[in-house]
Image (spheres, coloured by chain):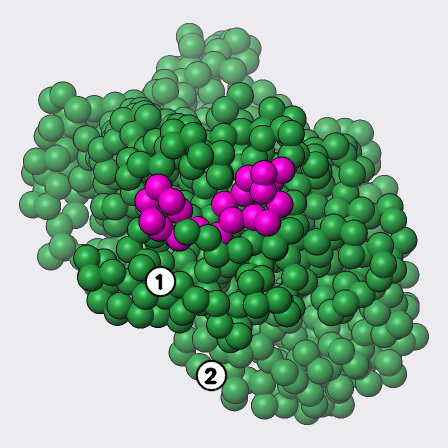
Chain colours: A green, B purple
DNA sequence: GCAAGGTC
């Protein structure tokens, strides 16, 4: 209040207060004096509020009025308006620009002039952001021109509440010219670049290709289009890849996730499957914990637009239009806000109380008031000007002018009530299964308290149940190798696009929807439902930039602009410095474009021709099902600068997978062993060699897992422990059959077949899947199998053979009869283990170290981690795009 | 006829 002490001797002073918009002027007047008077002005929306107020010791007559955003607008003088008369380069760097009060704002200028004459003090209540600071200077310039004596003050407020406004009056400051200059710089750069590039593009392309619309360039609209085109190209160029995984379903039908996730190499998965195949699993961990689903953050404009688009299927542009109408009719707070936390001074209880008689959520609001209220979460964004969007007056469905308006009001109010509610609570159970050396997990969720979810249908929390198991339980499982295909990226939704723009600083909360609208008006993009796709014009434009090596469609130019604006705002650089630097850079680009104009016409023409049927073909309702655009692919292919380079790249990428089997030509897979050496394995022939050894046929035969050609009548397949043949044998104890290794007693490997097999005979037929010998099997009468005779592949790991109930067990176990009982639990507990290599199924006296298992899951050194094996799961190859190795999760948990 | 940023 000290600022007004000097005026005391003059008695009552008159103070002109100016806000950025009529609503703020009204709110401040209401907050400071309920008994204010209202006078009309020449501008119908901008009233003049009058009231008396004591500024400290000083009696003041307060005049409170408003503008509507900027008063001034930058423009080129009339002589530059003829496009074909001026070189765009002159428009960009030489033409002068004037900053003038536009015709439609003339009444506001008149108001300010008239009021300023009659006041001795001016308090600027513009929004507390860069643009607000610039508008403050526009206002003070008008006022000072009329009344040079007027004393200027800047009020900083973070919410229009009594506490905040009072505090602002007690801490009046001077407007910040640096902030304002940063806006002037942005305005000039945007106009110069926008006008010059738009003129250049339009004049060059319009006539040549008979285009009716303007081919505009803007530093926000074109990066927006860039995002849309980028997604379309990702979809069009996507090549599906097959992946494999082990499916584990337990006795209750519950399906578990394999800890390794999906793997892109079938044989790797088959090997892992072969190694872990069994019908039992041990429950190694059951964890139950309380979890919460967080209620939403208070609603900012960006989130509001995304929600409206996603959940109500109302476009961001339309949603903002409806929100502004609701705001103007007094139903909701100001809808253009970056803020996602409520100021501490706002009375949330009162806002809830306004809703307690609502026919739909009145009861819920009452419960909040009485007992369930919970302080909203505080986001990390604050524009210091507006609170999050919230209802300010109750509206029932019948009050709404349209269904969409009702939907929007519901969304805002339900969101607000959800913010004031408690988080939802639930109980999450995680079951971990160990199946030999593979682990699987399953998570289940039970919601215990819905809380905010009761009022908030825009969020989901789905429940899923899991069986009740205890640690140590042995359960029956069914393992299968399953496969799937990677899917292309989904078409870009408007909500996603808003998120991308927000993240990259393209546009502001108040303009993002406008840029999305602009690219549609310019015929660069088209929206169907919530999906936004580029048109052929948009594609051709962006592709031309790309092919010619320009990055005009990328977001970094805007980011650089933002960085430079900050430098001016902080006073580190002068406005003219950054304008000149930016214009100089853009002049270079424009000159290059001008020099390459024939190439631009040629490239643009090629794309338009290649895409001539694109817009028509693009007319499907379900874009997800659309096949990749061949025209675009072909054109992209044609424009790939060096085909050779591409091939070299591919070769480089395949470098690690280039070694091929000398016998069958199949690509080899690398397997890291416990002793650190690397085996190159042919997954077709089941042959392996040490990597360091030269690749020749004789060496390659040194270690063989299995051979496909069996000439001896007794041969079946090779032992995966010692590589000698396995032979059908009959157990003397149980009268059942098993495959025994010819290397016995040095090798005790054995594969036991189900008791129900009463006879088994080798045939000359081969399995279509794994090329192993097939066996004719006969089953006893008490077998549960309906078919009593089957031709089967019994090679461990081949899914054909797994339809039977064979069991793989060490001969050692059988001989000592420790575990040859029907109690399957016994097998697991008493499995023999080699002390030398820790492998199962053989003892150390026959261990040859490198055949412990076919895949060794061990830590790799840094170099290997980079290119060869996944460091988490040890598997050569890749996990699906965008996903990390799921083994990481398991490892982390176990730590 | 051109930009982007305020605003009704």
Q: Which residue is mark 1?
A: A759
Q: Which residue is mark 2?
A: A619
- Determine the image quadrant of residue A133: top right
Question: Residue A610 location in percent, x, y?
Answer: 69, 87
**Image height check: is A594 above or below A131?**
below
Residue at 35%, 41% in the rendered image? A733
The answer to whether tags 2 and 1 share a subunit is yes
Left or right of A304? Residue A795 is right
Residue at 33%, 49% in the rendered image? A735
**Image height check: is A128 above or below A487?**
above
Q: Secondary structure at mark 1?
A: strand
Q: Nearer the viewer, residue A283 or A187?
A: A283
- Total number of numbered discs in the rendering: 2
Residue A548: image tag: none
Left or right of A854? Residue A561 is right
Q: Subunit of mark 2?
A: A
Residue stretch in magenta: A731-750
Question: Residue A378 location in percent, x, y?
Answer: 41, 26
Residue at 52%, 15% in the rendered image? A171
Q: Nearer the viewer, residue A197 or A540?
A: A540
């Amino acid at each position: 209040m000290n600022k007004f002490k000097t005026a005391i001797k003059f008695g009552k002073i008159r103070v002109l207060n100016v806000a950025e918009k009529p609503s703020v002027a009204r709110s401040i007047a209401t907050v400071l004096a309920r008994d204010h008077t209202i006078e009309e002005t020449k501008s119908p929306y901008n009233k003049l509020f009058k009231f008396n107020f004591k500024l400290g010791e000083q009696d003041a007559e307060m005049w409170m009025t408003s503008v509507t955003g900027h008063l001034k607008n930058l423009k080129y003088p009339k002589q530059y308006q003829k496009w074909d008369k001026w070189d765009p380069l002159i428009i960009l760097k030489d033409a002068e620009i004037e900053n003038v009060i536009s015709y439609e704002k003339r009444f506001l200028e008149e108001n300010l002039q008239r009021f300023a004459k009659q006041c001795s003090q001016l308090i600027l209540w513009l929004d507390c952001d860069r643009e607000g600071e610039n508008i403050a200077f526009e206002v003070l310039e008008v006022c000072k021109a009329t009344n040079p004596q007027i004393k200027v003050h800047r009020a900083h407020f973070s919410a229009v509440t009594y506490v905040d406004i009072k505090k602002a009056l007690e801490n009046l400051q001077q407007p910040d010219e640096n902030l304002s200059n940063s806006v002037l710089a942005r305005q000039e750069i945007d106009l110069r670049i926008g006008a010059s590039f738009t003129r250049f593009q339009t004049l060059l392309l319009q006539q040549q290709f008979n285009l009716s619309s303007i081919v505009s360039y803007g530093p926000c609209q074109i990066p927006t289009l860039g995002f849309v085109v980028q997604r379309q190209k990702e979809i069009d160029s996507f090549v599906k890849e097959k992946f494999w995984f082990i499916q584990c379903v337990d006795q209750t039908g519950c399906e578990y996730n394999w800890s390794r996730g999906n793997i892109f190499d079938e044989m790797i998965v088959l090997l892992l499957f072969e190694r872990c195949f069994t019908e039992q699993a041990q429950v190694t961990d059951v964890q139950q914990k309380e979890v919460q689903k967080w209620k939403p953050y208070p609603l900012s404009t960006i989130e509001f637009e995304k929600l409206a688009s996603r959940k109500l299927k109302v476009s961001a542009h339309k949603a903002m239009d409806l929100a502004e109408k609701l705001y103007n009719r007094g139903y909701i707070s100001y809808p253009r806000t970056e803020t996602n936390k409520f100021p501490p001074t706002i009375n949330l209880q009162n806002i809830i109380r306004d809703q307690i008689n609502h026919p739909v959520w009145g009861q819920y609001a009452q419960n909040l008031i009485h007992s369930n209220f919970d302080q909203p979460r505080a986001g990390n964004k604050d524009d210091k000007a507006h609170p999050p969007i919230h209802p300010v007056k109750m509206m029932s469905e019948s009050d709404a002018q349209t269904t969409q308006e009702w939907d929007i009001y519901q969304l805002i109010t339900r969101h607000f009530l959800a913010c004031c509610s408690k988080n939802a609570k639930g109980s999450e159970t995680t079951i971990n299964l160990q199946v030999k050396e593979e682990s699987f997990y399953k998570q289940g969720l039970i919601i215990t308290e819905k809380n905010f979810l009761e009022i908030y249908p825009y969020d989901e929390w789905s429940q899923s149940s899991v069986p009740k198991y205890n640690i140590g339980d042995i359960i029956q499982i069914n393992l299968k190798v399953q496969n799937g295909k990677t899917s292309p990226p989904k078409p870009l939704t408007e909500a996603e696009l808003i998120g991308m723009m927000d993240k990259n600083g393209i546009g502001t909360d108040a303009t993002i929807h406008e840029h999305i609208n602009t690219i549609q008006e310019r015929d660069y993009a088209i929206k169907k439902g919530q999906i936004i796709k580029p048109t052929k014009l948009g594609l051709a434009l962006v592709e031309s930039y790309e092919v010619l090596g320009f990055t005009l469609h990328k977001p970094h130019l805007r980011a650089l602009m933002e960085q430079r604006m900050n430098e001016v705002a902080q006073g580190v650089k002068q406005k003219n410095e950054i304008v000149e630097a930016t214009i100089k850079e853009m002049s270079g680009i424009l000159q290059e474009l001008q020099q390459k104009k024939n190439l631009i016409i040629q490239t643009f023409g090629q794309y338009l021709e290649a895409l001539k049927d694109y817009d028509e073909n693009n007319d499907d309702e379900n874009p997800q099902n659309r096949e990749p655009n061949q025209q675009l692919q072909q054109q992209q292919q044609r424009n790939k600068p060096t085909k050779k380079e591409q091939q070299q790249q591919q070769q480089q990428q395949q470098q690690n997978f280039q070694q091929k089997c000398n016998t069958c030509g199949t690509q080899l897979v690398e397997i890291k062993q416990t002793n650190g050496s690397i085996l190159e394995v042919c997954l077709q022939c089941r042959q392996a060699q040490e990597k360091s050894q030269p690749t020749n046929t004789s060496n390659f035969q040194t270690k063989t897992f299995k051979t496909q050609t069996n000439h001896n009548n007794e041969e079946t397949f090779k032992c995966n422990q010692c590589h000698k043949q396995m032979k059908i044998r009959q157990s003397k104890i149980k009268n059942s059959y098993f495959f025994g290794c010819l290397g016995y007693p040095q090798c005790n490997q054995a594969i036991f077949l189900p008791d129900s097999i009463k006879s088994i005979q080798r045939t000359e037929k081969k399995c279509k899947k794994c090329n192993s010998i097939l066996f004719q099997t006969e089953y006893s009468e008490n077998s549960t199998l309906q078919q009593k005779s089957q031709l089967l592949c019994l090679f461990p790991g081949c899914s054909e053979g797994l339809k039977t109930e064979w069991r793989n067990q060490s001969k050692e176990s059988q001989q000592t009869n420790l575990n040859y009982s029907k109690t399957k639990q016994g097998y697991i507990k008493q499995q023999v283990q080699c002390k030398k290599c820790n492998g199962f199924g053989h003892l150390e006296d026959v261990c040859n170290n490198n055949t412990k298992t076919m895949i060794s899951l061990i830590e790799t050194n840094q170099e290997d981690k980079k290119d060869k094996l996944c460091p988490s799961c040890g598997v050569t190859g890749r996990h699906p795009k965008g996903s990390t190795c799921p083994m990481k999760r398991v490892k982390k948990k176990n730590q």
